[in-house]
Image (spheres, rainbow, N blue to C red):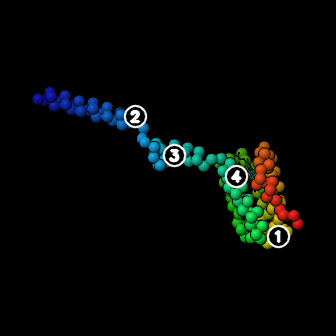
Amino acid sequence: MKHTSVAMVAVAAVMFSAGYVVAQATPKPPSNDWLLEAPNDVERFKLLQRYLRGFDQPMWEVGYRWESVHDALTRNNFEAAVYHWEKIRTTIENGFLKRPARRANAEAIFINSGVYEQVKKGFESKDRKQAWAAFTAARTACMSCHDAEKMGHMNNQRIIQTLTAPPT
Ligand code: HEC
């Protein structure tokens, strides 16, 4: 009797551990908890880092806001032009947070060169002529940075080629 119960416990233990191994080996079905189900924080940060992309995604936002600047100036909505212009700076800074190699040209050509402030003042003047002159100066800076970053092909796109100051 005693022997039988020992044997039963042993069999149960084997069955339990076998089941455990099977449970470990079976991958979880896909779920929406892509971060919560990552095995640890390092893997979570890797997933986040991949998801947050590089310089392309901030530039995509810059492009969208650049169209909004043009639209705002067309409507003499200078406040909106300033708003989008400030967001463009934030977005470029967040871009070189992720891709530090882009920082030198972004600062030299765009932020520290004085262009950023000069353009902002132009929009804030609420004077159509000054505001559009500022737009042209900004556009030149965008294109210069693309050239400096060996991304000159970015300048041959609708957003750069067709969004220009209206003829005076
Ligand atoms: C650091 C200098 C720099 C400045 C300043 C800059 N760009 Fe860019 N831009 C880049 C780089 C680099 C890329 C390519 C991104 C990549 O390959 O990850 C790019 C890509 C783009 C794209 C394509 C994004 C996409 O993937 O759809 C647009 C649109 C764009 N820039 C617009 C602008 C506009 C408008 C301005 C000015 C308001 C501007 N950029 C200022 C460096 C710059």
Point out the tag, 1 or 2, that comes first from the N-terminus: 2
Question: Whole-percent x and y of residue 133?
Answer: 84, 64
Residue placed under numbered mark 3 in the picture? 44
Q: How far apart are labels 2 and 4 at the CA level?
A: 43 Å
Q: Amino acid at mark 2?
A: Ala
Q: Which residue, given by chain and number where applicable, does mark 1 sit on?
A: 128
Q: Position of residue 86 (x, y in %)?
A: 71, 63
Q: Is residue 146 visible?
A: no
- The reply to whether the C-beta atoms of the residues labelled 2 and 3 are less than 8 Å apart is no
Quadrant (top left, top right, bottom left, bottom right) of the N terminus: top left
Query: Considering the numbered disc 3 on the image, is that residue within a helix, a strand or a loop?
Result: helix
Left/right of residue 9 with respect to residue 62 in the rendered view: left
**Placement of the C terminus among the 4 image quadrants:** bottom right
Residue 46 position in % (x across, y down): 55, 44
Amino acid carrying mark 1 in the image: Arg
Q: Residue at x 79, y 58 (%)?
A: 163
- The 10 Å Cα crowd at callout 2, few under 14, some 14 to 19, many 20 or more, is few
Mark 1 burial class by Cα count in 10 Å: few <14, some 14-19, many 20+: some
The reply to whether dot 3 and dot 4 touch (C-beta < 8 Å) is: no
Say whether residue 53 is left or right of residue 111.
left
Taking 83 as reference, is 31 above or below it? above
Question: Residue 59 has which mark?
Answer: 4
- Marks 1 and 2 sit apart, C-alpha to C-alpha, by 68 Å
Q: Nearer the viewer, mark 3 or mark 1?
A: 1
Q: Looking at numbered disc 3 in the image, what kind of residue is underneath it? A: Arg
Instruction: Give x and y (percent) for residue 6.
Output: 18, 30
Disc 4 residue crowd, few under 14, some 14–19, many 20+, Cα 10 Å? some
Q: Quadrant of residue 81?
A: bottom right
Asked whether mark 4 lies closer than 8 Å to ligand 1, one says yes
Secondary structure beneath dot 1 equals helix
Q: Which mark is residue 115?
A: none
